[in-house]
Image: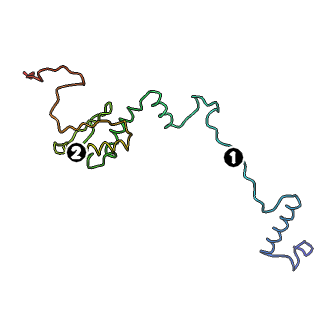
Amino acid sequence: MSGDEPGAGADAPKGADLVRAALASAKAAARAKGVAPGGRRRRPVLRPVVRGSGAKDARDPVLFGEAVRRLVAERGWEETTTNASVLQRWDELVGPELAEHCRPASLVDGELVLVAESSAWATQVRLLVGQLMRTLREQVGPDVVTKVVVRGPAQPDWRKGPRRVQGRGPRDTYG
């Protein structure tokens, strides 16, 4: 290094002073160009994400849950799915204690058939039918369950189906 280089003299800035001088000269150069030093950069304008082709027809992609809701509505399965949700969520709807001793057998045309594990529990559930109806109306809707039938532990039933011929019973068919 020779003594005729700029900034190589005894009074040349060193360390932090050198950095401050470089920053000041960069700011001055920016002002000369017309750019405000330390100014905030403008954020690019974000355009909304367009899903699909923009044609808004049935071929555009949709979320899975929306597609299932649309399918259920088109096929007229709302009542079936609501009834199935009552049977599936039975523990959640009535609480663990009642669900442990009483299970739903069917829900057809608003009639909920419950099967209790003992005749004592069947009697207890029959006493709770009013409260049970209020709870079900609040949780699943007013017209889903309109009647509750409580049955105790049952013997084998030989009658099959909702339409049957009145007869004399099972008879001795075992030989």
Q: Is residue 135 above or below residue 147?
A: below
The outermost residue toward the right is 4
Q: Which residue is mark 2?
A: 127
Q: Looking at the image, which residue sits at the far bottom?
A: 10
Q: Quadrant of the N terminus?
A: bottom right
Mark 1 packing: few (<14 Cα in 10 Å), some, or many (20+)?
few
Q: Looking at this view, is 168 or 56 the one in front?
A: 168
Q: Is residue 83 left or right of residue 44?
A: left
Coordinates of residue 51 in the picture (x, y in percent): 61, 37
Q: In the shown orientation, is residue 70 left or right of residue 163?
A: right
Residue 103 falls in image quadrant: top left
> As shown in the figure, which amino acid type bears the numbered disc 2?
Leu
Report the disc number at residue 46: 1
Q: Quadrant of residue 108?
A: top left
Per the image, label 2 sits on a secondary structure element best described as helix
Left or right of 124: which side holds 108? right
Q: Where is residue 132 shown, x and y percent of the image? A: 29, 44
Callout 1 amino acid? Leu
x and y percent of residue 128 in the render?
A: 25, 45
Q: How many marks?
A: 2
Mark 1 and mark 2 in contact? Answer it, CB < 8 Å: no
On the image, which quarter does residue 17 sit in?
Answer: bottom right
